[in-house]
Image (spheres, rainbow, N blue to C red):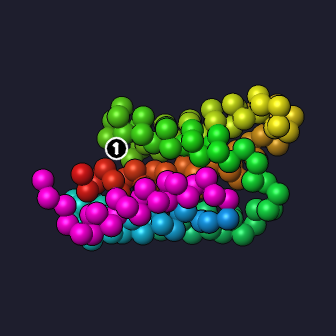
Amino acid sequence: MTLSSLAIIAIVLATVSAALLFVPRVPSVVLSYTSLVCAGLSGAQYITTQVYIYWAVATAIVLGLRVLQPQSAKYGRGYICGGALTGALLGYLLSPTAASMILCSALGAFFGGAAYMRTPRSPRMAINSPRFLSYLAAQGLPAVVSSVMAAIAVMSVL
């Protein structure tokens, strides 16, 4: 199996975007979308125009929410991003579909947030509170979108 140069670039960009999930200052969702575009241009059959549009809208929403999010809301990012990446991988292993990866990545982000709330450094929030839901949405949505796009890009070229 030989990979084209665009496929290799897509894999590298997906890997870098997964690593940049843990860095709060860098929007890794842009690299994930770029890896998805490179995977599509390399001839991946799964990536169609609808996939480009869907993930472009998701990327725009994440970037818009990033502008609105306060800078102080960056705590616990490692737990949620690690959970989202693990969930995307497990979702692919369960069923290699985007729906499975999205669902498992969202569950992984939730469990990562719940695990962080049990650490001594976390703010005291009940998991069933609106404040936790807001925190999870602010931290988890970018992680889920970026990790699933990276997983789709890698999945489609391999």
> Would residue 26 be seen by someone viewing this image from the given angle?
yes
Q: Relative to 20, does residue 5 appear above or below in the rendering?
A: below
The picture places residue 98, in percent across and down from the top left corner, at 39, 47
Q: Residue furthest top?
A: 118
Q: Is residue 136 magenta?
A: no
Which residue occupies 79% across, 54% down? 73
Total count of labels: 1
Which residue occupies 34% across, 64% down? 10
> Would residue 61 be seen by someone viewing this image from the given angle?
no
The picture places residue 35, in percent across and down from the top left corner, at 39, 65
Mark 1 burial class by Cα count in 10 Å: few <14, some 14-19, many 20+: some
In the picture provided, is 10 more to the left or to the right than 85? Answer: left
Q: Nearer the viewer, residue 120 or 111?
A: 120
Which residue occupies 33% across, 53% down? 154
Which residue is label 1 attached to? 97
In the picture provided, is 108 more to the left or to the right than 33? Answer: right
Which residue occupies 55% across, 62% down? 28
Residue 119 found in image quarter: top right
Task: Give the dominant element type of the magenta stretch: helix, strand or loop.
Answer: helix
The picture places residue 152, in percent across and down from the top left corner, at 37, 53
Magenta segment range? 1-24
Q: Is residue 13 magenta?
A: yes
Q: Nearer the viewer, residue 79 or 94?
A: 79
Q: SS at mark 1?
A: loop
The picture places residue 51, in percent across and down from the top left corner, at 37, 62
Q: Amino acid at mark 1?
A: Thr
Q: Residue furthest left?
A: 1
